[in-house]
Image (tube, rainbow, N blue to C red):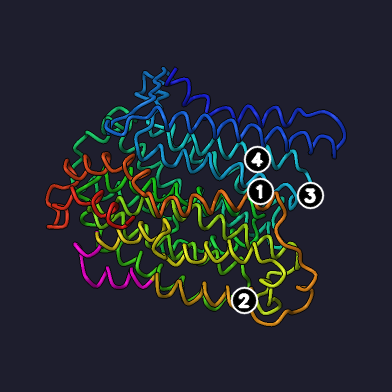
Amino acid sequence: MQPILLSLITYLPLAGALVAFLCPGGPAERDRAARWLGLWTTLVTLGLSVLLWIGFDPAQPGLQYETRLGWLSEYGITYHTGVDGISLVFVLLTAFLTPLSLLAGWRSVQTQGRDFVAMLLMLETALFGLFSAQDLVLFYVFYEATLIPGSLMIGIWGGQKRVWASLQFFLFTFAGSLFMLVGLITMWLKTGTTDIPTLMATGFSQPLQGWLLLAFVLAFGVKLPLFPLHAWLPDAYTEAPTPAAAMMSGVLSKTGAYGLLRFGVLMFPDAARSFAPYILALGVAAILYAAIVAYAQSDMKRMVAYSSFSHMGMIAVGLFTLTAEGIDGAIFQMLSHGVVIAALFFCVAAVAWRAETRDIDALGGVAKQMPMLALLAMLFTMANVGLPGTGSFVGELLVLMGAVHVSLWVALLAGSTMILGAVYMLSLYRRVLFGSVKGTVSLLRDLTAGEMAILVPLAVVTLWMGVHPSTFTRLFDPVVMQAVQGHVATGLSAGATHVGTAQDIVNVASR
């Protein structure tokens, strides 16, 4: 039953997408039926993902729920899936955000609703497949599959510049994927297999590791995005419809960080040590650059987009500290950021849909008309800043603890994300929510029951991650520690000797 459960989670959304395409009736009836079908499909998938979580044994750092089938066996390529603690948390994140994103598009996506639901469900299947793939060819197939629904959602249901934004997103990501394909073929020629666990145990020479890691950095650095490969991000996030923006920033960007972790830090440890100073510098550059540019924005959605870019720089720093604390912090920050950034996009959409503008200067006094939104937006703003008691604080604390072992200056510069984030986020909150009422703000009405159903679960998880972070760290911490104690720890600086402290720091941070 266990392997079947993971396959069911992966392909149930795809089945829902196919059924949605077959919904009969006129456009209105067809769209309504597809929306309800999509909602129930994502909720059932979420329930199955919770069962996957319950049945998962955190004490075993290896793969669980494995499935291995013949595919191109004569070429060393198989259909191999399974999850460890790292994969599991991203499966849960995807399953959690998808139904909320679908609900967010219930009212805002007013045309071709059936097609939109199908695209969202297809994206969910691609993400599940990507995070559970244990064969590099299978991973590549699912990684490329995310491009189709992602670019279509931007290009069809996006804003005025949607075509350009969609084209940028597709071309940047597809061009980066070519480097992954070259690396994939190189490893296959060297080993005769694309099985990820086998490749992880293969001792590639240091020069070859360097070239392979360079290929994967270029591939995944686009999706992360890693500075300066971010040119597609502002337009894509801004022009995308709110559900797509939430999924892209909340989950899709994490595929880049996930790939860097799997096929960089863990697979090529020698090359990762050589690359670390440069990736750390690029991560710090992203934190500072994106924060400064975010403060200069006049569009709420664009400011949140740059905020996302800044925080992804923090995740890159955590991964390439090459310490247990830093890697744990990066993973936890990915989860927390996925929840918080999606919530911020939903809050922006709630105001923009009512006021018919995203211009910060055209808004003011929203809190007087929408007190519930003001309350929830304050929570998500504080979480984005890294306030203690929220999940972001735990993730950033662990990243900084890992960075301190590498360089005090890296830790100080990376930690500036808290200060700079407070500057632009509190400025956004003050200008939009407080002050005198402007324009049509006096006509705004507070959150509906449907919008509360979207934002309240996000608020609960944000606080849950801050108060009980060990709920999640206990899933992936054993995998990280095993890797650091194994081949990753060899030759590292003194910081890697702290492999036993990550969970202790989490426990202290949650008090």
Alpha carbon of mark 3 to alpha carbon of mark 4: how far?
A: 15 Å
- Measured as percent of width and height from the top left, residue 196 is found at 32, 33
Judging depth in this view, the residue of 175 and 383 nearest the camera is: 383
Q: Residues within 10 Å of mark 4 (few under 14, many from 20)?
A: many
Q: Locate residue 372: give its quadrant.
A: bottom right
- Identify the mark at residue 110; answer none if there is no mark: 3
For the N terminus, give its image quadrant: top left
- Identify the mark at residue 119; answer none if there is no mark: 4
Magenta stretch bounds: 402-416
Residue in the image at 21% along x and 70% along y: 408
Alpha carbon of mark 1 to alpha carbon of mark 2: how far?
A: 24 Å
Judging depth in this view, the residue of 378 and 407 nearest the camera is: 378
- Identify the mark at residue 303; answer none if there is no mark: none
Q: Residue furthest front?
A: 511
- Identify the mark at residue 153; answer none if there is no mark: 1
Q: Horizontal placement of 175 versus 396: left or right?
A: right
Compare marks 1 and 2 and give the one earlier in the sequence.
1
Residue in the image at 21% along x and 39% along y: 482
